Image: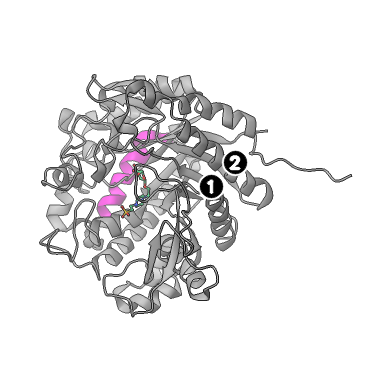
Amino acid sequence: MGSTTKAHLPKDFLWGFATASYQIEGAPHEDGRADSIWDTFCRIPGKIADGSSGDVACDSYHRYKEDVALLKSIGAKAYRFSISWSRVIPLGGRDDPVNEKGLQYYVDLVDELHANGIEPLITLFHWDLPQTLHDRYGGFLNQEEYVQDYVRFARVMFKAMGSKVKMWITYNEPWCSSILGYSIGQFAPGHTSDRKKSPVGDSSIEPWRVGHSILISHGAAVKVYREEFKSSDGGEIGITLNGDWVEPWDANDPKDVEACERKLEFSISWFADPIYKGEYPASMRKQLGDRLPSFTDDERALVQGSNDFYGMNHYTADYIKHLESAPEPDNFNGNLETSKTNKEGHAIGPETQSPWLCPYAPGFRKLLKWISDRYDRPIMYVTESGTSLKGENDKTRDEILEDDFRVEYFRDYVNAMAEASTFDDVDVRGYMAWSLMDNFEWAEGYETRFGVTFVDYEGGQKRYPKKSARVIGEIFSSMCE
Ligand code: GBH
């Protein structure tokens, strides 16, 4: 008689929630915090859908104890949050003063988490670069200056947290900082070649330089952690990369199949190949030539082997159609079109409030395996995954709290991950749902909600757990054995 194994996750699987500083904290000028590029970007008319900003957001600067109590009530084992660099070092630079009050906020948050038995995961950088560094020398575009400033910031944080923090993430989604910030111009600082959107920027060159600076600074910070802190503090450090799964638009067209691989390389391997293999993917070099920087020997030594774990953010999938024409200079995805429907007109998944997000859980399993296979089975943590709901913000509070669509998303995605873990030899050890609560959804403002908790922005930021907040714990307890 054959036995059947049920998809499951390890008993000590780490699950919890993720947030980011600018999306939840508010208090932009309290206790010495200075502007980040997102504070200034939000002030430019037309950049944020509802004209809002993170000025108040979830008010987590004042309500972090409530946030931790909420996490505890849901049963979360871990909480991933990010540091506002300009709260800790308002002027950002390596010779600028540390703002003790700003730093203390994060120490208090970590202490509060520990007091409640919740593991802190710290993201050093989730897009909110100190404005001064942008003004002083062009931020990421000045690799020489930037790397030194980032390393100093990282060292200040490692030192302040000592052995209290066992998991460090250097960057959240460098693809977004590079492409959305310096090619499309949809995110701060809004650089693009499109002069209708921005007076500055060169989409054919800047995103690739930005990506390179980020990689080098990641490697340099990891070196500092390993040399100065790891032996005493015993933590792990890595980077978080975003990536969507891909299916060919026409499954019978080998060029669409090939384009799928190219799309994964241009979005994921752009950063992961240098970290695991020491070089940018050949497909990128072929299309971009010298516009893609090269690694010096010293740089390669910093970057290669710099991940203790692979941080994976994953939400959705696309159909991919190759393009016959030569790539445009501004092309950033491998010369192809993405679509939510295939040749037969079949949609990859249901619509949500986010045009880019149509849930397709089987793609999660496939992408976990693709990454695991390409990079020799790294330890993986899913550092974000979640969904918005079409029209959620137009409903009454009572209706919003019954978020069955989100419940099903987590059920399907966690199950897909368990299948990858059980059947595909993927070493995945954690899952942080995006997000603990509704928050400032970048260029979408507050119109799009991603939380398992409803935040009443008109009612003093009061929090109301949705159905998904209750169910997610049941999903994990049934899966972890
Ligand atoms: C995450 O990125 C972010 O880390 C998090 O801060 C954010 O709140 C969350 O997503 C939800 O959006 O508009 O067509 O150019 C997820 C990966 C990659 C998703 C870029 C949106 C923009 C596509 N993101 N993508 S488009």
Say what amino acid the circle numbered 2 marks. Answer: Asn
- Residue 299: % across, % down: 37, 66
Q: Is residue 117 visible?
A: yes
**Quadrant where the N terminus lies?**
top right
Q: Earlier in the sequence, mark 1 or mark 2?
A: 1
Q: Quadrant of the C terminus?
A: top right
Is residue 295 visible in the rendered image? The answer is no
Rendering quarter of residue 448? top left
Q: Residue 302, position in %: x, y? A: 41, 61
- Taking 26 as reference, is 148 above or below it? below
| Residue bounds of the magenta highlight | 148-162
- Location of residue 386 with respect to 423 vertically, above or below: above
The image quarter containing residue 62 is top left
Q: Give the CA distance from mark 1 to mark 2.
A: 8 Å
Residue visible at 25% across and 71% down? 204
Circle 1 crowding by C-alpha within 10 Å: few under 14, some 14–19, many from 20: many
Please give the name of the residue rendered at 27% of the width and 56% of the height, measured from the top-left corner: 180
Name the secondary structure under disc 1: helix
The location of residue 131, given as percent across then percent down, is 16, 47
Give the residue number, with chain letter if any, for mark 2.
415
Foreground residue among 261 and 233 = 261
To which residue does mark 1 refer?
361
Relative horizontal placement of residue 474, taking residue 61 as reference (left or right): right
Relative image position of residue 466 (x, y in whole percent): 42, 25
Q: Nearer the viewer, residue 303 or 141?
A: 141
Tag 1 and tag 2, C-beta contact below 8 Å: yes
Q: What amino acid type is highlighted by mark number 1? A: Ala
- For the residue pair 405 and 36, the one nearer the viewer reads as 405
Name the main secondary structure of what is drawn in magenta.
helix
Question: Between 19 and 115, which is closer to the camera in this rendering?
Answer: 19
Mark 2: few, some, or many residues within 10 Å (few <14, many ≥20)?
many
